Amino acid sequence: MHLNPKVGADWMLPGQQKVVVTPGQNVKRYLAGALEVRRGRVQWVTAAHKRSGLFIDLLRKIARAYATARVIHVIVDNYSIHSSRQTQLALASLPRLRLHFLPPYCPELNAIERVWLDLHAEVTRNHRCATIAELMIEVHDYLRYRNRTRLRQRPQAVA
């Protein structure tokens, strides 16, 4: 997430021009997330840096969220933090997690990428947040709302 907004297509009334404020010095925060494809629920963590620790925090959160699962399959792309030495050491303490690597250069196969596209379209494109804290509140609110609405839309079992 960038404090300087992603500039993209937007609508406005005829004869008006939308102003996109850029605060100058860019500040970034990073998200790592996992999408449970059956229910559409997203687990996510944030950090100031995109390092192995961010991914390891996500793996630990997934393990806690699915504490009763015997095995948890996690599909990842080939980003270096997914196979770093730190990650390998952490996986040794998380034996229920199994990483499955996608082929290189195939983001269209990674379902979480569609969530990030929606997040950028709904929150970060042309945003007007003055601080990174304000932007991250909007990001977290969007993801929580997304999880609530996805869980409500699940078809109910018929007895």
Image: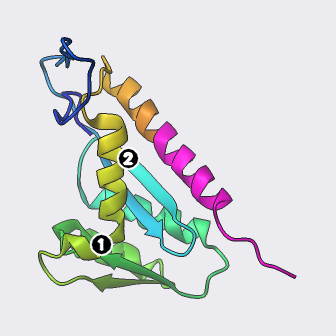
Q: Amino acid at mark 2?
A: Thr
Could you say whether the residue bearing mark 2 is in a helix, strand or loop? strand
Task: Kindly indicate the quadrant of the structure image that contains residue 131.
Answer: top left
Q: Is residue 33 above or below residue 5?
A: below
Residue at 32% from the left image edge and 27% from the top image edge: 132
Badge 2 is on which residue?
46
Total labels: the figure holds: 2
Residue sitting at the far front: 14
Q: Is residue 35 above or below residue 53?
A: below
Residue sitting at the far top: 15
Task: Kindly indicate the quadrant of the structure image that contains residue 3.
Answer: top left
Q: Is residue 128 above or below residue 121?
A: above
In this view, the residue in front, 16 or 106, is 16
Does residue 136 appear in this view? Answer: yes
Q: Is residue 110 magenta?
A: no
Residue at 37% from the left image edge and 64% from the top image edge: 56
Quadrant showing the C terminus: bottom right
Question: Viewed as shown, does residue 5 lie left or right of 65?
Answer: left
Separation of marks 1 and 2 at Cα, in angstroms: 19 Å
- Magenta region: which residues? 141-159
Could you say whether the residue bearing mark 1 is in a helix, strand or loop? loop
Question: Viewed as shown, does residue 58 lie left or right of 89?
Answer: right
Residue 128, given in percent of the width and then of the height, sits at: 30, 20
Badge 1 is on which residue?
110
Residue 145, given in percent of the width and then of the height, sits at: 56, 44
Q: Residues within 10 Å of mark 1 (few under 14, many from 20)?
A: some
First-in-chain label (1 vs 2): 2
Residue 100, given in percent of the width and then of the height, sits at: 32, 85
Question: Viewed as shown, does residue 137 lie left or right of 29?
Answer: right
Q: Is residue 154 magenta?
A: yes
